[in-house]
Image: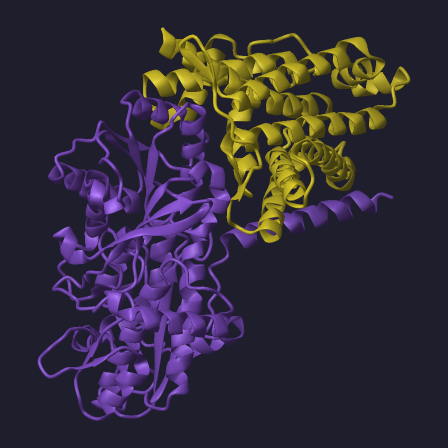
Chain colours: A yellow, B purple
Amino acid sequence: MSQFLQTIVFGLATGSLIGVAALGLTLSYGVTGFINFAYGELLTVSAFSTWLGVTSGLPLVVAAAVAVLVVAGVALLLDHAFYQPLRGRGAMPLLITSIGLSFVLQNVLRMGFGADPRPFPVPLVRPWTIGSVFVPPVQAVVFATAVIAMAVLHVLLRRTMLGRRMRATAENDALARLSGVRTTATLRVTWVVSGLLAGLAGLMLGATETNVTATMGFVFLPVVFAAVILGGIGQPYGAMAGAMVVGIGMELGATYLSPDYTLAFAFAALVAALLFRPHGIFRGGATRGT
Amino acid sequence: MHTRPRTRLTTALALVALATTACSAPAPVTGSEGAENGSDATSTASPADPATSGVTTSDTSPGSDQEVAIGLALPFTGEYSWVGANVQPVAEMVVEEVNADDAFPGSITLVQGDTEGVVDAGVTAARKLATADGVVAFVGPTSLSFTGVRQVIEDTGVVMISPTAGTTELDDAGTELFFRTVPSDSLGGRAIAAAIGDATVLGRDAAFESPALLVGEAPALVSFAEPVADGLAAQGLEPVANASFVTGKQSYRSEIADVLAAEPDVVVLVAAPEDSAQIMREAFEAGYEGTWFVTQDQTNADYVDLAGAELVEGTYGLVEAPFADAEQRVADFSQRLQDFAGVEPDTFSLNTYDAVNVLALASLRLALAGEQVTRDALPDAIRAVGNADDGDVVVTSYEEGTQALQAGDEIDYQGLVGPVDFDDNGNITAPFAIQEVVEGTWTTVTTLAPEDLDGP
């Protein structure tokens, strides 16, 4: 029983990490209508920025905050320079451009920081023991951060005018524009929010993996995709649920079947779920109209 | 206004093409003195089919100037790029010293082949070096690529002298083409086992009683597992856990939980530095308070920086030790390397020095005898300069070897890592050091001579 509980603890932490990343990705899809393959590199930029900040003498918290803001800025910049000019030409040009940007950003990071891994500056702390289960403080922080991020996003989407505009743009941008919503500005804000979430996820990924490399975000992206698709692409609440299913599924599979195939369990969970709910867990819930 | 999106799309696609090109471009070829000499290195090598002829020099008349190309078949990019970075300056230094000396009739050039530390890229790089660049010998590969490069060597007849490949695959390779100036993992594994099972080796009050093995699933890593287990068995110890893991994962918590459930007092971790740092941290976060024992990849200052000094404090590490008789020569080498490249010797530096010196002396021996430096001729020449025979003059450098060979003597090269006497499979024996991280710095605890380890 304690092994099961321990696995659930690990699963919640893994799901939390995936969840925050999935939220940012699905949010941008919901409003822009294309999957941003360069999203993984936003996570990497966050981790490298934090490492750079700390090695430059900034306290970890300050460096992390700066890193999140940097990623939001990079997301906005990418949209302005590459995505916005292509908007209106359909999803495919945007998709291909994002794949290209993913490679460009990886190579830029590799040129800037080298191929060697860098240590993510997370403090070394002994675990908390609760009964027969131990909880690494880093994982507790990851979980708490995810809960807060999800709550803030919920409030943003449901309780603010900005959230209504974002949802209206996602549902039907032409109609939203006719209704007086400044959809271009709303899209920009969406990129910023997506970037903030990516920045946060990058911090969590760095703290979890402990090393920072130019490909860390790219390698992590398939798991995020699995959560997003499982939750129903474009559905923030679905992404959260999908992330938890994927995270806990990965840890259960690693513990009770084989740790060698952790990623395979993520996709097995995805396939199994989609067999029964082809549109994802939260079908029909909607931020993205069809 | 309508042209801007098109312009940007074009720019984006151009960047995509640039990135894709950057990802797939072949490894750069450089000469012995950097990229600017790259074209020289390839142009001086024979375009003839070296795989069948075995002749790789541009001039085939005996006694005349020869251009000998040597391939650095090593990882220069990727997770193990540090290996290439450590080897290259040493190889360049030796080659520059050789070329500055007039003894060799011609010159030696280095050609870089990036194996990326993986099998597929290793095969591609080795094949290019062997066929397009016409090298007569490889300095390399690492154990990581050896499985694939082995076939290229056997197909083309290129001689390999690796300063880095400790893999047990080479213990009884059974061909005259394989040489190495690094001791086998078999010996290293026994050194680890001796340190764990015999308290006197590390000067501890008591020996470890519950060792566990945690080994990454890669040929170069698995190579260590059996010698350690066998060595422990010889010490009367049975590992309480013997686990493996897929490398490069996001988390190793399940594997760590399995190992820690066996309550080990020491864990032998055979893994890449990146994975090792993550595993040690996750084990710490899971409450592990025992000792770690790591191998050469982690026993360096870079690993302490990567994992964090606090995390690795008290960790033991295995590393090749200099030859007991070579203390002053190692100091001299360090100074020369510092002067040449501005770097301190690092992992595999001494092994590289010996590997390139042996190749240079073997080439010189052939040239002075009026023979061509070919793939076919090199193996016997390498044994002749490396191994001790009656009447050989002992030499410890290219300069000393030159004087002896020019005087008509046969030589026995004694290197920085050991006597460099190759057995029938091209293996050498050399001492190992056990180091411990003390206040963030690797500190030598003891040195184990090969004869103490009862192995080849």
Residue A83 seen by the camera: no
Q: Residue at x 26, y 87 (%)?
A: B367
Q: Quadrant of residue A146?
A: top right
Q: List x then y, in percent, for residue B61.
A: 27, 91
Please tell me which residue lies in front, B349 or B61: B349
Please tell me which residue lies in front, B380 or B298: B298
On the rendered image, what quadrant is the C terminus of chain A found in? top right
Q: List x then y, in percent, for residue B402.
A: 28, 86
On the rendered image, what quadrant is the N terminus of chain A found in? top left
Q: Where B356 sits versus B153, above or below?
A: below
Q: Give the total number of marks visible in the rendering.
A: 0
Q: Where B49 sits versus B309, above or below?
A: below
Q: List x then y, in percent, for residue A142.
A: 58, 21
Q: Residue at x 18, y 57 (%)?
A: B450
The residue furthest left is B390
Please tell me which residue lies in front, B239 or B65: B239
Q: Quadrant of residue A45?
A: top right
> In the displayed structure, does residue A240 sit left or right of residue B347?
right
The residue furthest front is B205
> In the displayed structure, does residue B312 sit left or right of residue A193?
left
Q: List x then y, in percent, for residue A234.
A: 65, 18
Q: Where A259 sits versus B312, above or below?
A: above
> In the displayed structure, does residue A173 sit left or right of residue A281?
right
Q: Residue at x 71, y 50 (%)?
A: B11
Residue A15 seen by the camera: yes
The residue furthest right is A180
